[in-house]
Amino acid sequence: MQNIKKITSETYLFYAVFVSLALLYIWGITRQRLFPFVDLPDHLAAATIYRYYSDSQTLFKSFYELNTFLKPNVFHLMFCSLPVFASVEVANKVYLCIYAIVFPLSTLIAIRYCKGNKWFALLSFLMLYNFNVMWGFMGYMMAVPLFIITYVSIVRYVNKSNISYAVISMGMMVLLFFVHVQIAVFAAGMLFAVIIFSYRRAVVAGFRKLWIAVPSLFLILFWWHSNGGEKKYGGTLSYLIWYWLNEFLRVLHKRWNLCIIDNAFLFDFQHLDLALIFTLPIIAFGLHFFLFYGIQGIRHMLPQEGKAFALLLGISMVCFFILPHGIPDQYYVYERFSVIFFLAFIIILSVLYERLKKTDSMHSFSVGRLLVSIFIICVCGKLLSFQFRIWIVALSSVAVGCAWFWIRYEWIKKVLFLTLVVIHAHLYNHSFSTFNNNNEKFTPDFFSALSIGEPFTAAIYEIAYKSLPAYIHFPSYYVVWNKGNARMSITDFRFATIRLRKAVSLPPYEEWVGIHPEIDLSMYDGARYIFTRGIYPSSAQNFFSAYQIVNMQGEYRIYEKKQ
């Protein structure tokens, strides 16, 4: 009876902590006015156009055309354009709050399915603001936790042949297509991999279960064919072959950024390595199991469900290391898989720890293990030319991760988890708050003097917030706040559902002028208004001499062409 009460009280404590942490992140979201998510302004502008497309008080219908029928990546667009919300920005906050709940919840669902230690689900919060979120990939960010839930359902179906899980898996894979097509393709690939893994001796029989992917694959192929496919986008497969033959080995050493990529944007360019604080302890946990038990020991300890996530871990790691940075008309490809890798890693660690936490070996300190761990870090550091500060952070993180296992009191381990997550939440909430304060003068009134319909473009010379080019799409707020018309990169994007009409001529927008100030601005000659952030360089002096400032707030200025 006492054991039952202890388990019950521990469960209540865990869920109280879990919910409190989620609320801490949600609190940080709700108090934000502007977010430093790179592509977010473009997505908000697209939702604004979609929501007010038929509004006679806007000129959207004259400038843009919509094509959302059976198109991927429309979930965020549809959600934020719902009329139940006061504005697309309010809708986006709700979307982010839902994400802040679903993301750690998906990891908890997977851990419970694998019968792992639920306290490890707290570590998933460390991946909440991953690379995809900070770059404003609003569809992909939501697709990640939905994929984890889908993967659990797929594994259940493949192992148990339960028709209810087949229907759930099929529905979730269709949903993933509309959230983000790249994850939908990955989910179909993982279904294929799980079947091969689970039916190694009867693969043909296992392939009969592929039928659950048919609806999503139909949508993918229909979209690919109707959108031009390989002819339009220059041959994705041929580019991948060229990359693997010519570029792969040359850039492979840079992929050590797996350890920092998901939290690097908390810091400026000189301190990116501090992101190791949130990932190296996790890697050290895995290193502990590997060095002490070996591959065979880990395989023996993992149940079938855990092995499925080991498969996910391996495939996501392969994707991270072998895929290129970009493919024709799409960038940031390999970077998107780091968060899946770490979530799978956390889930596996939870299973291993739950299996072994009551054995004596888990409480014995091994100097040999620690020395071997340090040796591996040193070898990697020498090969990758680590700076001294990275050495200190890396060695300290590994030492903490390994020492964590010989702590005898479970409550101390839980406090360490909680402390790490609270520090993570505080740093992000503080970073977001600072971003808000830096842009307190950038409000809807800033664009109010502009005449809607007049040619508008921008030259953003100060693009960075910390190590993130957070300002390159700020011109899209002219569309969001004032229902103006502007050329946005999202209208020219590969998966765009909103495009400029062919008969419409809007001034171009060069988003990377802040990195390449030598760019000739003569292409902006047709613009009546130019929105800038930062001081233009001397090379642009002649061009801007034809314009006058009509509004100025802090670093922001609006120039109007002189009559």
Image: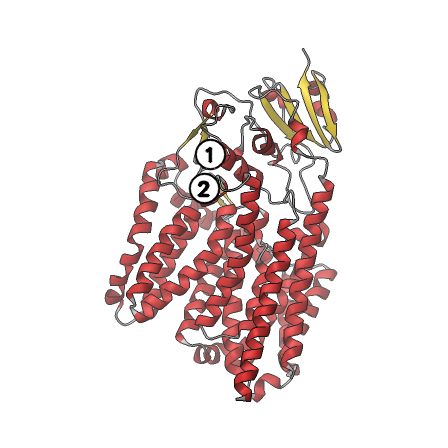
- Give coordinates of residue 227: x percent, y percent: 36, 36
The residue that appears at 53% across and 68% down in the rendered structure is: 346
SS at badge 1: helix
Q: Relative to 218, is 151 on the left or the right?
A: right
Quarter-of-image position of residue 428: bottom right
Local packing at callout 2 (Cα closer than 10 Å; few below 14, some 14-19, many 20+) is some
Whichever of labels 1 and 2 marks the residue nearer the N terminus, that label is 1
Which numbered tag is attached to residue 367? none
**Residue 265: % across, % down:** 65, 51
Q: Residue 68 or 364: which is nearer the viewer?
A: 68
| Nearer to the camera, 76 or 320 | 76
Q: How far apart are the two marked residues, 1 and 2, measured between alpha carbons?
A: 8 Å
Residue at x 48% of width, y 47% of height: 139
Q: Is residue 215 visible?
A: yes
User: Residue at point 51% right, 61% down?
Assistant: 341
Way the structure is coloured: secondary structure
Residue at the disc numbered 1: 50
Q: Which residue is label 2 attached to?
A: 78
- Identified by mark 2, the residue type is Met
